[in-house]
Image (cartoon, rainbow, N blue to C red):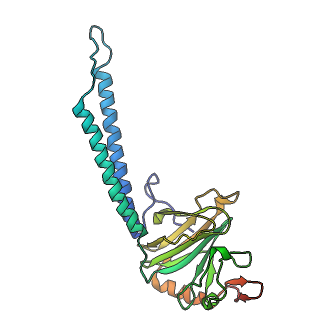
């Protein structure tokens, strides 16, 4: 079960990833900037409404513009937006940079209306897979000639060790879904026929969170969720050791079938 929201429910939930730190800085800066601009413009607006209101015996003053003011209110927003674009591009690059070589690789596949997670077995290497190979008998599209196919295991919860980089490969078996974890500051559409391989993150603390589909994908969309547990390395190692004892990937083919013991 995901953690309950505490504190300010009108703001974003607490961030728990390293990449989310920069994202929150950018979000906060834009929020306070727009708040300042809003109150500043409304103050000027109200001041002029009062100062230049219609009064008996006072003639209206007609102005044809002020070049100095026009240059200021054109140049200043341009510089602000240019700065935001440069800083935002840097944040975007940091989020999309290649993951570390020692990252934990996990494939996450969405379908109406649930999520499946595929972990590598004892070798630490995920079996090769291709979205073009996805069938009712091969729900991950695994290459059955890959020896690692016998090692992989699947779960319906995402369990990850705190502080370790996690590289997720996102796929859909049917319609467009969305990988959305607010506390991770990650939102990514999952498109049928594509493998989204740029998403990776590193958590800052342990906790229970929730993966939710954020694309309307059918009548069961509201319940398309999966638990996420961020645990200590020791707890993860214990969980992983139990899982690799019972690989449970089932792959069917016309002439070849690999079926491991059920979890």
Image location of residue 167, percent across then percent down = 49, 76
Q: Residue furthest top?
A: 57
Quarter of image, res 255: bottom right
Q: Residue at x 30, y 12 (%)?
A: 55
> In front here: 221 or 110?
110
Image location of residue 56, percent across then percent down = 30, 8
Left or right, 253 with respect to 28, comes to right
Left or right, 1 with respect to 231, comes to right
Quadrant occupied by the N terminus: bottom right
Q: Residue at x 37, y 58 (%)?
A: 88
Vertical comparison of 77 with 50: above or below? below
Q: Residue furthest right?
A: 254
Quarter of image, res 118: bottom right
Image location of residue 114, percent across then percent down = 65, 68
Q: Residue at x 74, y 78 (%)?
A: 137
Left or right, 46 with respect to 146, comes to left
Q: How many marks?
A: 0
Q: Residue at x 72, y 88 (%)?
A: 259
Q: Residue furthest left?
A: 68
> In front here: 134 or 121?
134
Image location of residue 215, percent across then percent down = 60, 58
Quadrant occupied by the C terminus: bottom right
Left or right, 168 with respect to 15, comes to right
């Amino acid at each position: 079960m995901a953690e309950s929201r505490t504190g300010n429910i009108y703001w974003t939930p607490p961030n728990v990833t390293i990449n989310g730190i920069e994202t929150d800085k950018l979000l906060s800066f834009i929020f306070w900037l727009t708040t300042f601009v809003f109150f500043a413009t409304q103050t000027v607006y109200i001041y002029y409404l009062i100062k230049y209101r219609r009064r008996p015996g006072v003639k209206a003053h007609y102005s044809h513009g002020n070049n100095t003011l026009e240059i200021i209110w054109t140049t200043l927003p341009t510089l602000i937006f240019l700065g935001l674009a440069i800083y935002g591009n840097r944040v975007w690059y940091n989020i999309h940079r290649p993951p570390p070589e020692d990252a934990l690789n996990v494939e996450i596949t969405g379908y109406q209306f649930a999520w499946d997670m595929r972990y590598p077995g004892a070798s630490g290497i995920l079996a090769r897979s291709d979205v073009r190979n996805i069938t009712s008998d091969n729900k991950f599209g695994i290459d059955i000639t890959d020896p690692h196919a016998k090692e992989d295991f699947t779960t319906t919860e995402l369990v990850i060790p705190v502080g370790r980089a996690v590289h997720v490969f996102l796929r859909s078996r049917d319609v467009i879904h969305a990988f959305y974890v607010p506390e991770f500051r990650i939102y990514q559409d999952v498109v049928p026929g594509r493998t989204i391989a740029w998403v990776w993150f590193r958590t800052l603390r342990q906790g229970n969170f929730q993966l939710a589909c954020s694309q309307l994908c059918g009548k069961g969309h509201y319940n398309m969720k999966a638990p996420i547990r961020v645990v200590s390395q020791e707890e993860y190692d214990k969980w992983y050791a139990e899982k690799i004892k019972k690989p449970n990937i089932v792959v069917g083919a016309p002439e070849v079938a690999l079926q491991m013991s059920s979890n």
